[in-house]
Amino acid sequence: MATNFSKELMVKPGKKVKLAKCDPEETLGWEKGHRMKASLAKAIERLDTQQYLLFAERKRALLIVLQSLDAGGKDGTIRHVMTGCNPQGCTVASFRKPSAEEAAHDFLWRVHRAVPMYGDIGIFNRSHYEDVLVVRVHNLVAKEVWSRRYEQINEFERILHENNVKILKFFLHISKDEQKRRFRQRLDDPDRQWKISEADFDERKFWDEYVEAYEDALTKCSTPHAPWYIIPANKKWFRNLAVSHILAEALEGLRMKFPAPSVDVKKLKWQ
């Protein structure tokens, strides 16, 4: 089955997003089974090959942004999709409540510091988009402040792109019922109860507000140089399949090459 995951799941620049029209159960015709597992394994193998090229070339970096509502699967995506990558060339940064030092700077300061260096893959588990999501939903700053941040984010990402940072942004889209089911699984599993907090349940009250905030962020900040992808994520296996293929396709599109050797290998002699 030939599926162009990038084309099917990308938010086209300028398109207004309505998440109610995006089915979190969608699988684009794929079913769980041997064919899916083989395709996932192949995509992860391709990603491993491209990471090696990225690391060898050291002319650019890849920044992966993962956003979702609680229990959307950010940690699981990192664990399963990046499983074939060399950890020496992969970093993960999480952005939660700003520290005192971070709060004393502009909202992008802590984010820019975490951008991967050339040759590396950097993953943001939550990101600068929290400053137009949770900040907006909970009125942590005035609307006149957070409403300007969409343009500031686009400019920030444009600067990164023009300096050879490839940016891919994934919104892991789950339903409210699926979130409830995952919360229940955590409550029923003693080894996972540590992942549940009262805040998780409190945030469910703001589901509609978060959906509206995400729709604005996806609409206003999907650009040709830093596109958003809406990943149907109720089914974890499809989430992993889609993200892995999009990453592999994007890196292959860079047409990276190994650098020339620093010495004349023909003149090297065994001692």
Image (cartoon, rainbow, N blue to C red):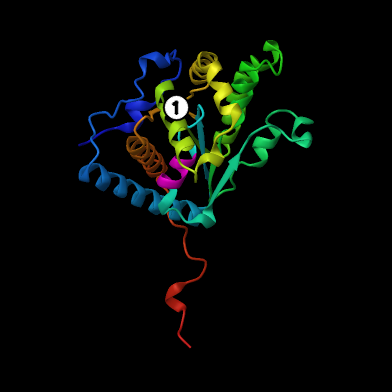
Q: With respect to residue 221, does 47 lie above or below?
A: below
Q: Quadrant for residue 94, please give it.
A: top right
Q: With respect to residue 217, does 251 lie above or below?
A: below
Of residues 219 and 164, the one nearer the viewer is 219
Q: Residue at x 35, y 49 (%)?
A: 46
Q: Is residue 103 visible?
A: yes
Q: Residue at x 49, y 44 (%)?
A: 190
Per the image, the residue denoted by label 1 is 179
Judge from the rendering whether residue 204 lies leftward or rightward of residue 37; answer left or right.
right
Q: Quadrant for residue 229, please give it.
A: top left
Q: Residue at x 64, y 24 (%)?
A: 131
Q: Quadrant of the N terminus?
A: top left
Structural crowding at the residue carrying mark 1, measured as other residues with C-alpha within 10 Å and reported as few (<14), some (14–19) or many (≥20): some
The magenta-colored residue range is 75-81
Q: Name the dominant secondary structure of the magenta segment.
A: helix
**Label total for image:** 1
Q: Estimate the x, y position of residue 18 in percent, counting from the top left.
A: 42, 13
Is residue 10 magenta-colored? no
Q: Residue at x 39, y 37 (%)?
A: 243
Q: Estimate the x, y position of residue 263 in percent, counting from the top left.
A: 51, 70
Of residues 30 and 179, the one nearer the viewer is 179
Q: Estimate the x, y position of residue 70 in percent, counting from the top left.
A: 51, 29
Q: Is residue 229 visible?
A: no
Residue furthest to the bottom in view is 271
Q: With respect to residue 103, does 14 lie above or below?
A: above
Of residues 188 and 47, the one nearer the viewer is 188
Q: With respect to residue 59, does 219 lie above or below?
A: above
Q: Amino acid at mark 1?
A: Gln
Label 1 secondary element: helix
Q: Estimate the x, y position of residue 134 in percent, counting from the top left.
A: 61, 22
